[in-house]
Amino acid sequence: MKELEKYLERAMACQTALVLLEWDNETLAPEKAGARTARVQGALSAAYQEVMTDPHLYERIQAAQQEELTEVERAIIREAKEEIRQLSCIPPQEYRAFQEMVAESTRIWAKARAANDFEAFAPTLEKIVACQKRFASYRAEKGQKLYDVMLDTYEKGFDMERLDGFFDQLKRELVPFLHRVTESCVWIPDEFLDGDYPQEKQRELAEYVAKYVGFDFGKGVLAVSAHPFTTNLHNCDVRITTHYSSRVDSSLFSVIHECGHAVYEMGIDDELTQTLVGQGASMGMHESQSRFFENILGRDEAFWVPLYSRVKELFPEPLRGVGREGFVRAINRVTPGLIRTEADELTYSLHVLVRYELEKLLIEEDLDVRELPGLWADKYEEYLGVRPSTDAEGVLQDIHWAQGSFGYFPSYALGSAFGAQMYAYMKGQMDIDSLLRQGEIGQIREFLRVHVHRFGKVKTSREILRDMTGEDFNPSYYVRYLKEKYGKLYQIEE
């Protein structure tokens, strides 16, 4: 095991360097750096693959399995074998070429989005889709669908069959409920959220709220990027970004969201960090924590009892005459829109539904990428009642496909559902409302650290749910949570 750890440490160092370059690329790197930096990223990716597919590494895994191992060591070996399985079937030249392509494609996407020109990105997207389908075919077991291979990368135990059932339930329950909400006579003013909110004051609020929810600035930094994200080198170096606009709630809730991710990473046990099990259990479990902090806690009226006076101090003019209750109602207003990252809590998973259905078409039915803008617009109109008029507010709004991340999007909806299931259980274990009103969010955060964060990838998301709540994944909690919360807000009786 000790010899195996030496190999894995080299692999970890390559991954750490890649994370740093990705962070720099999204925050500080000059525009013209892209192509040359992509070569470095390609070389590092090739080095990582070389380490992980070295026959000597597998020999040490075989030998280590004969030793008396801890639970963590067994989990590390499990993840190492899985990584070897995924990487060894891809020819090194193809793997490096793909890594260089996606390193550069994010810049092509960014330019296309700024120019509102999908056609400028379409040829690159075609290449990415073709590569991902080819890689999935290398990895697929006999009879396994290509998209199921991709889904397994981000959320084990959730294939198309299980996800079809989940999304069908959301479509069946939430689409008609959303229609009832939008037809409600209840009016919730929120115009005061858009106004003269100076960027420097927004950053001050962002840092204040980040510290409050548990972001340790001794172990993390907050920067600005076009698309807010979280990344980490280990549990003592976690980095988040946000963006600032005239809408104060846009940055505010992106910060709370990213802090949920960051608190998760900072809470991983020291024994696990910088190993193959030193990250969150899955993308879905990661989203459960970010959306738990952002929505379940952050949009609860009780959350703002100890905080709202500080918000008013920072922005006295735009919030003049706006009490805490009016502010909380405004940040929960349902407004079907076009942008996923700006979506309200009720409509959010319908944005994900659109992407899930389109990814299935791209991967399983060979959809021509040039049909995406029209299909995207049609599905938005069907599910959310809105239609994009530009590529920038439609098919070009997300970076994920430019990064080659097919199969990632369902994790966003799963995370929301995981969080609602945890919340239902936690309410029976503690008085969450009282803790929030008293500013004791640390007790809630500690409960999540003990039951979720500290395990890293030692447990799968479904194992975490079962061990914590006593039952397997059950999306009914999510539907019930949304209907109860927004039924009350919009005076809708079931």
Image (cartoon, helix red, strand yellow):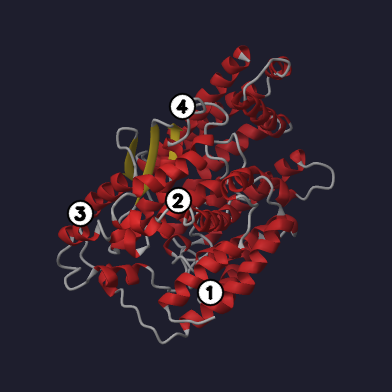
Closest to the camera, between mark 4 and mark 2, is: 4
Q: Which residue is mark 1?
A: 384
Q: Is residue 82 above or below residue 227?
A: above
Residue at the spot 56% in from the left edge and 76% down from the top edge: 381
Q: Is residue 109 above or below residue 134?
A: below
Callout 4 touching callout 1 (CB < 8 Å): no
Measure the C-alpha gap from mark 1 to mark 3. 34 Å
Mark in front: 4 vs 1: 4
**Label 4 to label 2: alpha-carbon separation:** 21 Å
Q: Position of residue 376 (x, y in %)?
A: 58, 68
Q: Nearer the viewer, mark 3 or mark 2?
A: 2
Residue beneath disc 2: 290
Quadrant where the C terminus is found in the figure: bottom right
Residue at 56% across, 36% down: 100
Q: Secondary structure at mark 1?
A: helix
Residue 159 vertical position relative to residue 395 in the rendered view, above or below: above
